[in-house]
Image (cartoon, helix red, strand yellow):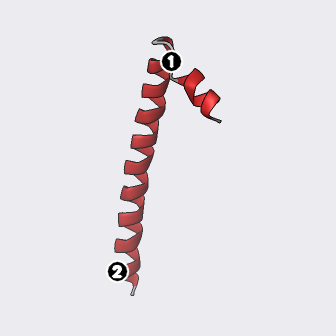
Amino acid sequence: MPSFFSELFSGDENLGAIGLVGLGFFLAVLLLKRLYAGGVRRWRRAV
C-alpha cells in the first residue's frame, strides 16, 4: 500500500489527477451535507 502512494505522488503529471479527485471529494461532501440538512429539515417538519 505505501508503494502505491509513493507511485501516486511521484511526478508532477499526477498532481492534476490528485487535484481532480480532491475537488470531486470536496464537492461530494458539500452535496451530502446539503442533502443531510434538507432531510433533517423535512423530517422535523413532518414531525
The local secondary structure at tag 2 comes to: helix
Residue visible at 47% across and 26% down in the picture: 18
Question: In the rendering, at what x and y percent does residue 25 appear?
Answer: 45, 41
Question: In the rendering, at what x and y percent does residue 3 appear?
Answer: 63, 28
Residue behind mark 1: 14
* Frontmost residue, 3 versus 15: 3
Task: Name above or below for residue 40 compared with residue 8.
Answer: below
Amino acid found under the numbered disc labelled 1: Asn
As drawn, which residue projects farthest toward the bottom?
A: 47
Q: Earlier in the sequence, mark 1 or mark 2?
A: 1
For the image, the number of numbered tags is 2
State which mark lies toward you, 1 or 2: 1
Q: Which mark is residue 44?
A: none
Q: Which mark is residue 45?
A: 2
Residue visible at 39% across and 87% down in the picture: 47
Amino acid found under the numbered disc labelled 2: Arg
Q: Quadrant of residue 12?
A: top left
* Frontmost residue, 2 versus 41: 2
Q: CA distance from mark 1 to mark 2?
A: 47 Å
Q: Quadrant of residue 45?
A: bottom left
Q: Say whether residue 9 is left or right of residue 39.
A: right
Residue visible at 35% across and 81% down in the picture: 44
Q: Residues within 10 Å of mark 2 (few under 14, many from 20)?
A: few
Q: Residues within 10 Å of mark 1 (few under 14, many from 20)?
A: few
Residue visible at 50% across and 18% down in the picture: 14
User: Which quadrant is the N terminus positioned in?
Assistant: top right
The local secondary structure at tag 1 comes to: helix
Task: Name above or below for residue 29 compared with residue 45.
Answer: above
Q: Say whether residue 33 is left or right of residue 1.
A: left
Task: Name above or below for residue 32 compared with residue 7.
Answer: below
